[in-house]
């Protein structure tokens, strides 16, 4: 099939590369010429495991990047993969979705063959029928009988996105009518996964509810962890026993500094807004966010309890990315920690195997180190913020660790004497 993908960000690029690998002809529309040039020369504009190899193998064959919307009318399907960042009140900002829909519509004006517009961006329930459909049909001057609409949420985890795309747990296809749903479904021929064919609005809500449930599991584990800490119980042992119940599963029960990244905090805040606008007070979701906001500050309090006021103290911050396997620091728990340490006038020495440069763009004024040893040298205390596997053996490699006060925000170290945020 001929597929146009709008938006060369994380989801757009990974989806384009995977669809090309599956044999489709993909044109990726990206407005930034620098990104277009980079993608067309086989260099991904972001880090994701396995992406470089797959892009190099497909670029110029099944995949091409462009800034021109002209390819839309040559394709069977266009897929909207633009960002829906949080607005000031926490709701999803849909301006990029609106713009992409309008541009797709304008391009479809000069074509008369059947076309499906699919949205992969996470959008509030009602957006595909209320905004995307209206904008596309108005701009294209065509009717809903020859342009179909689909909402196909993505469930890709950063660091495992290619694996998640090629081996999904399920494929959710919400559609305006059965013809559009069936037409679109064919792009996933060859992928073995249960298919959920449903309405547009249900598909939109499945995405929010999935992320909200995963975030709730994390905040739940953190709350149990905070209680366990006071009672002298190891929450990881507790959750091992809890997670073996097949109704619960062992996944997303790791207590720690809380969830970050470009999805959970943004999507839960948006869902809270959606609920409030509908007249419902989402008590549980508000608590999920509140627990998450408090977790990093618990690490600071623990550190203060151990080494006293932090003013002038040298603090090693080990791990900056929102999780391991990425250079992404969006909503990373380390951001809250850095702000709190700066407020207290501590001297910060930060290190991350991949994310030093990303964090430098947010906090240019703190010291970034080339390795953990440099960060730890003469440090009064150390906070571990990301579960990079290479941190597991830090204590064996550096005697330095043994004389430091170490607070773990992620359970990773095997050393004696480190204290966990809630274990
Ligand atoms: C998340 C979802 O897992 C994907 O299914 C979804 O498609 C994606 O958001 C999205 O909406 O686009 P991602 O943000 O890449 O994926 O990261 P996760 O692996 O889910 O981790 C999110 C955060 O939760 C990280 O900060 C991680 O450290 C934290 N976490 C995760 C915990 O604190 N405990 C856990 O047990 C698991």
Image (cartoon, helix red, strand yellow):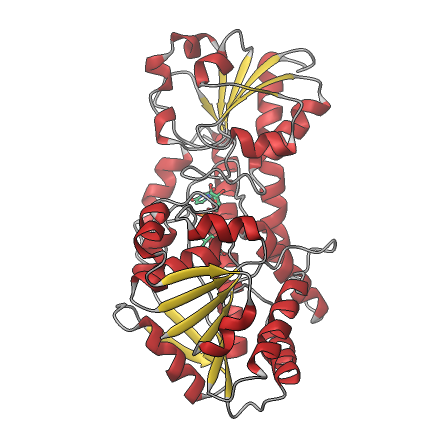
In this view, 250 is above or below 226: below
Nearest the eye: 422 or 409: 409
Where does the image place residue 107, in percent across and percent down from the top left? 58, 77
Q: Residue at x 42, y 82 (%)?
A: 181
Q: Residue at x 51, y 18 (%)?
A: 369
In this view, 398 is above or below 235: above
Nearest the eye: 179 or 341: 179
Where does the image place residue 69, in percent across and percent down from the top left? 55, 69
Residue 368 visible in image: yes
Residue 215 visible in image: no
Q: Residue at x 69, y 55 (%)?
A: 90
Q: Could you tell me which quadrant the C terminus lies in? A: top left
In this view, 128 is above or below 35: below
Quarter of the image where one finds residue 87: bottom right
How many numbered marks, from 0 up?
0
Q: Could you tell me which quadrant the N terminus lies in? A: bottom left
Where does the image place residue 192, in percent across and percent down from the top left? 26, 68
Nearest the eye: 407 or 43: 43
Quarter of the image where one finds residue 3: bottom left
Q: Is residue 356 found left or right of 392 in the rendered image?
A: right
Nearest the eye: 305 or 66: 66
Where does the image place residue 339, in percent across and percent down from the top left? 67, 29
Q: Is residue 305 found left or right of 395 in the rendered image?
A: right
Quarter of the image where one finds residue 187: bottom left
């Amino acid at each position: 099939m001929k597929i146009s993908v709008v938006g060369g960000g994380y989801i757009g690029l990974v989806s384009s590369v995977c669809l090309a690998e599956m044999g489709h002809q993909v044109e990726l529309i990206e407005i930034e010429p620098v990104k277009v040039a980079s993608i067309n020369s086989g260099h991904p504009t972001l880090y994701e495991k396995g992406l470089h190899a797959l892009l190099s193998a497909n670029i110029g064959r099944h995949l091409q990047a462009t800034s021109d919307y002209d390819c839309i009318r040559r394709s069977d399907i266009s897929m909207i993969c633009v960002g829906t960042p949080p607005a000031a009140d926490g709701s999803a900002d849909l301006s990029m979705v609106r713009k992409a829909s309008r541009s797709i519509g304008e391009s479809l004006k000069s074509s008369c063959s059947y076309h499906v517009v699919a949205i992969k961006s996470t959008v509030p329930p009602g957006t595909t029928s209320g905004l995307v459909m209206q904008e596309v049909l108005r701009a294209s001057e065509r009717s809903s009988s020859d342009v179909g609409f689909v909402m196909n949420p993505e469930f890709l985890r950063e660091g495992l996105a290619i694996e998640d795309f090629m081996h999904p747990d399920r494929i959710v296809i919400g559609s305006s009518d059965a013809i559009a749903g069936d037409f679109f479904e064919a792009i996933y021929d060859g992928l073995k996964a249960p298919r959920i064919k449903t309405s547009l609005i249900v598909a939109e809500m499945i995405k929010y509810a999935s992320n909200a449930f995963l975030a709730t599991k994390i905040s739940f584990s953190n709350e149990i962890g905070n209680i366990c800490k006071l009672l002298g119980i190891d929450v990881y042992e507790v959750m091992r026993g809890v997670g073996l119940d097949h109704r619960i599963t062992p996944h997303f029960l790791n207590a720690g500094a809380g969830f970050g990244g470009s999805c959970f905090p943004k999507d839960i805040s948006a869902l809270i807004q959606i609920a409030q606008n509908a007249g419902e007070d989402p008590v549980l979701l508000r608590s999920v966010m509140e627990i998450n906001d408090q977790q990093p500050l618990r690490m600071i309090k623990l550190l203060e309890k151990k080494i006293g006021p932090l003013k002038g103290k040298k603090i090693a911050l080990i791990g900056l990315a929102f999780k391991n396997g990425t250079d992404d620091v969006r909503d990373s728990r380390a951001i809250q920690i850095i702000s709190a340490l700066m407020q207290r006038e501590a001297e910060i020495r930060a290190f991350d195997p991949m994310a030093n440069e990303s964090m430098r763009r947010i906090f240019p004024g703190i010291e970034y180190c080339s390795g953990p040893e440099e960060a730890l040298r003469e440090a009064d205390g150390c906070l571990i913020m990301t579960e990079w596997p290479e941190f597991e053996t830090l204590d064996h490699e550096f005697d330095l660790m043994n004389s430091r006060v170490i607070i773990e925000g992620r359970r990773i170290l095997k050393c004696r004497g480190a204290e966990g945020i809630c274990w």
